[in-house]
């Protein structure tokens, strides 16, 4: 036996989503027990909801589906920095972080650093080379050195078709180019990106301006370097060289 | 407003939501970060900050799409090396399933897509209402309608793609 149907699917959906007060839940349950049509409607919505959840979950790239939650202490523990930025200091502030968690923590710092710079807070330099150790060295080589008004990132020992992208989060200019004389790929107004694909075993050069507040270098879809104001974060262990740092990433 | 706490609590959800909404991981990451940057210049209580972040990130992507369209019409100002990647591994069963889900989502009206994905992020009806600017009392009905549309679109996509 059934009485009048529920007014629309919205009540059934709210029931499924736990959005009804207890008194209304009881009414819906009593009605659905007696009404085949509404019970069927409830089953359909439940099935569609479960299917959507499963499908969307599988459709989501791993990088977004299960991102590491940034550690809130990272922002609070960051040593203060001066508002003015310089190449020398930027090169000296390479933080050595490990794995994907490090990338996201770096991203947290990126945001905080950029906004602090916008606000003009006065901060003191971070210690150079604060280190969190990482895994074994991999294949492709990165070298990061100051050059003129930019940070020069050289990637060598690349395999053919390695794709390197510089992504710029504000209005500064970043550039990525093949080093063997091919035309550069310049990016001139942000936010946006520029990409170069290694045609063979070759070097790719990325230039990050010292004044760039937020940017990153992405190799084959994986973030390798994050620039946050005058700090630079790598995802791999690095060794200090004469005027910069060198580290390796998987090719 | 405790920015760090809001960031820690909502960054992953916003990133994931934007990724699902746009199908573009990089665009999603940019939009999420831009939204948090904007939040730092404001002082919103957390219950307002959450729907605000999702709205701002969505607008950022939409504005970016408009700028891209304008650039396309005006001609390329940004020089790019055009060496398209070859990805034979994309022709897998998983890739096809992902494409079907993506296609079904893309064929939904924008509001339906948003409402379903916000619900996937655990938004309450009140939060969904604040984010997409509808009455809270109508959210259940809108979700049910969007779910039925998604189920129908996904079924159609499967039928189209199924080998004869």
Image: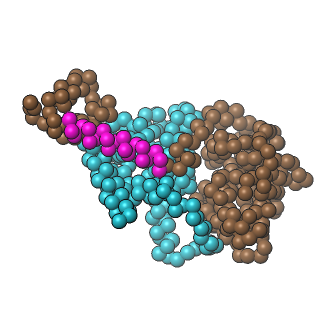
Chain colours: A brown, B cyan
Most extreme residue toward the right, as rendered? A242
- Above/below status of A163 relative to A68: below
Q: Position of residue A114 (x, y in %)?
A: 64, 47
Of residue B73 and residue A56, the one placed in the foreground of this image is A56
Quadrant of the rendered structure where residue A33 is? top left
Residue toward you, B67 or B104: B104
Q: Residue furthest front?
A: B164
Q: Say whether residue A87 is visible.
A: no
| Residue B123 can be seen in this image | yes
Q: Main secondary structure of the magenta part?
A: helix
Indicate whether residue A44 is drawn in magenta: yes
Seen from the viewer's position, the closer of residues B143 and A129 is B143
Picture layout, residue A158 above or below residue A129: below
Q: Position of residue A125 (x, y in %)?
A: 78, 41
Q: Residue at x 74, y 36 (%)?
A: A79
Q: Which residues are magenta?
A: A39-59
Q: Position of residue A99 (x, y in %)?
A: 69, 43
Tell me: B11 left or right of B52: right
Front-lying residue, A63 or A166: A63
In the visual, does B69 lie left or right of B164?
right
What residue is shown at x 77% (from left), y 68% (from top)? A201
Task: Name the residue: 82% across, 42% down.
Answer: A128
Image quarter in which the C terminus of chain A is found: bottom right
The picture places residue B15, in percent across and down from the top left corner, at 52, 46
């Amino acid at each position: 036996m059934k009485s009048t149907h529920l007014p629309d699917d919205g009540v059934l959906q709210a029931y499924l989503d736990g959005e009804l007060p207890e008194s209304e839940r009881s009414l819906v349950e009593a009605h659905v027990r007696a009404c085949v049509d509404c019970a069927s409607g409830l089953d359909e919505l439940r099935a569609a909801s479960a299917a959507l959840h499963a499908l969307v979950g599988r459709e989501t790239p791993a990088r977004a589906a299960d991102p590491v939650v940034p550690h809130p202490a990272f922002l609070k523990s960051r040593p203060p920095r001066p508002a003015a930025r310089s190449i020398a200091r930027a090169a000296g502030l390479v933080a050595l972080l490990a794995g994907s968690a490090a990338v996201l923590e770096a991203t947290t710092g990126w945001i905080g650093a950029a906004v602090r710079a916008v606000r003009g807070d006065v901060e003191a330099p971070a210690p150079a080379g604060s280190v969190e150790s990482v895994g074994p060295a991999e294949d492709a080589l990165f070298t990061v050195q100051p050059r003129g008004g930019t940070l020069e990132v050289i990637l060598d020992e690349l395999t053919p078709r390695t794709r390197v992208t510089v992504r710029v989060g504000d209005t500064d200019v970043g550039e990525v180019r093949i080093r063997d004389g091919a035309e550069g790929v310049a990016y001139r107004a942000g936010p946006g990106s520029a990409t170069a694909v290694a045609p063979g075993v070759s070097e790719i050069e990325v230039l990050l301006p010292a004044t760039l507040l937020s940017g990153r270098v992405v190799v084959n879809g994986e973030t390798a370097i994050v620039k946050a104001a005058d700090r630079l974060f790598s995802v791999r262990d690095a060794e200090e060289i004469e005027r910069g740092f060198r580290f390796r990433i998987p090719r | 407003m405790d920015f760090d706490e809001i960031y820690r609590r909502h960054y992953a959800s916003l990133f994931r939501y934007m990724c699902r909404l746009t199908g573009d991981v990089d665009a999603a990451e940019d939009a999420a970060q831009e939204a948090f940057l904007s939040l730092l210049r404001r002082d919103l209580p957390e219950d307002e900050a959450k729907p605000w972040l999702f709205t701002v990130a969505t607008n950022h992507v939409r504005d970016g799409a408009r700028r891209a369209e304008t650039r396309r019409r005006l001609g390329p100002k940004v020089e790019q090396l055009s060496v398209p990647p070859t990805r034979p591994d994309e022709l897998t069963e998983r890739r096809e399933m992902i494409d079907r889900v993506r296609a079904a989502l893309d064929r939904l009206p924008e509001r339906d897509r948003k409402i379903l994905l916000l619900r996937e992020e655990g938004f309450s009806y009140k939060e969904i209402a604040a984010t997409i600017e509808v009455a809270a009392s109508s959210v259940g009905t809108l979700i049910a309608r969007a779910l039925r549309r998604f189920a129908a679109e996904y079924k159609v996509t499967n039928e189209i793609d199924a080998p004869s």
